[in-house]
Amino acid sequence: MAEAVRATADRRVAWRPQPGPQQAMLACPVEDIFYGGARGGGKTDGLLGDWLAHAGRYGKEARGVFFRRTYPEIEEVERRAAVIFPLTGARLNVGKRTWIWDSGASLRMRYLQREEDAAHYQGHSNTWVGVDEITAWPTLSGLDKLRATLRSAAGIPCVLRASGNPGGPGHNQVKARYIDPAPPWHPFWDEEMKTWRVFIPSRMEHNLLLMQNDPNYWQRVEASASGRPDLIKAWRFGEWDIVAGGLLDDLFDPHRHIIEPFNIPASWKICRAFDWGSTHPFSVGWWAISDGTQAPNGKYYPRNSVIRIAEWYGWNNKANQGLKMLAIDVARGIVAREQQMGIADRVLPGPADAAMWAAENGVCIADDMVKGGAHFIQSDKSPGSRKTGAEAMRKYLAAARTFPPELPGMYIFNTCRQWIRTVPVIPRDPKNMDDADSDSEDH
């Protein structure tokens, strides 16, 4: 929230940044700013105010677009804009959802629900792009395509401004992009994207107007977390080393589930599981199944405990983007890795994506995998199977938290970095809270 009042009869204060993060964002020259953290930190107002500063500075050359993931979500932004913008002389073209100023500056309110929606904006020229609640997007690839629209024939600085809270489908990607590379307030160079970035954190204490007008807001935030420390850390204090409201975050404990590798006893079974992907990543996981005998590390894993001992993740080092390899080449790669690990004669075929068995244009992925030497069992794709699998996974993770363990649990070798990167942060499906969000990187 920010100040929007009439100062005198002939002069208006349309919007004034609050001291602290809001003020810092408006003064910051860095091209790509992520502004966010705890709930109630004044993020949306900060973006609207940053646009006003941009439009005031560059007039007719200022071309902006403000994104939320869906139109119902952007309606909240439009309501706030309708309070502030008319005080600056802006007019709303309702049909085009575009604000226009006398100077010639214009700001469009738009949605970007899916990655392919970004194609609608190719060829556009924008000097300012705002992305509100960026963690709501399961992948940043669609937003990245919009960076190509940042250009100005007049040569004015073009910027991207984003806001968000910890948690949500895009938590892990936003954290990797903005939080992990450098401390807050410290600009850093992204060599891959060829841009400067900076993270400006905000908490509700920085929103002085909110704290003054609604002093009990923080209590409602903590109450909504239902006593869960991870949610309180995320929503109240804006900490990113958690996942707020994910499918597994209440059970996953790296101290219990992540273990040092050891040689798999000869009496244990080893099987492989597979999730096919071409445009999106494929994932091969090798799992050892305990028969209840003591492991070489001296620890006891109850009979039928599962341990992920190795993996091959087919991605191009960009979140949720695959290698587009042919199925037969993937199969050959699987066989080569099993030979290298010395387990080729022990591996049993495990479950794989049922879509591999569907023939399309005379091509069956499962058949090509067999030609390459990798056999699998068709997984269950019946209604409710994903929820059943998610609940079984939760059950195994819960069992591994007890010490000493009494029931079969799930454990992960610390060398399986992609499982550790993606699985603990899988978000829930917003339409079915007992299932994973299939738009996320859930391979």
Image (cartoon, rainbow, N blue to C red):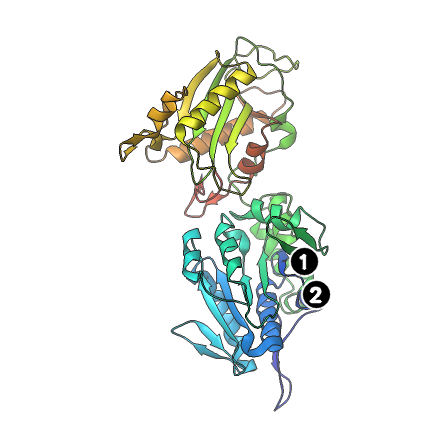
Residue underneath mark 1: 200
Left or right: residue 378 compared with residue 45: left
Q: Which mark is residue 24?
A: 2
Residue lying at 71% horizontally and 53% vertically, measured from the top left: 184
**Residue 94 image position (x, y, % from top left):** 41, 75
- The front one of 352 and 64 is 64
Q: Residues within 10 Å of mark 1 (few under 14, many from 20)?
A: many
Is residue 429 shown to the viewer in this render? yes
Q: Amino acid at mark 1?
A: Ile
Residue lying at 51% horizontally and 59% vertically, measured from the top left: 148
Q: Quadrant of the N terminus?
A: bottom right
- The front one of 195 and 160 is 195
**Residue 48 image position (x, y, % from top left):** 57, 69
Query: Of the residues under marks 1 and 2, which one precedes in the sequence?
Result: 2
Is residue 239 shown to the viewer in this render? no
Left or right: residue 414 compared with residue 277: right
Q: Amino acid at mark 2?
A: Ala
Circle 2 SS class: helix
To which quarter of the image does residue 8 belong?
Answer: bottom right
Residue, far bottom: 9
Query: How many angstroms separate mark 1 from mark 2 (CA)?
Result: 8 Å
Pointers 1 and 2 in contact (C-beta within 8 Å)? yes
**Residue 34 image position (x, y, % from top left):** 62, 57
Residue lying at 54% horizontally and 43% vertically, measured from the top left: 318
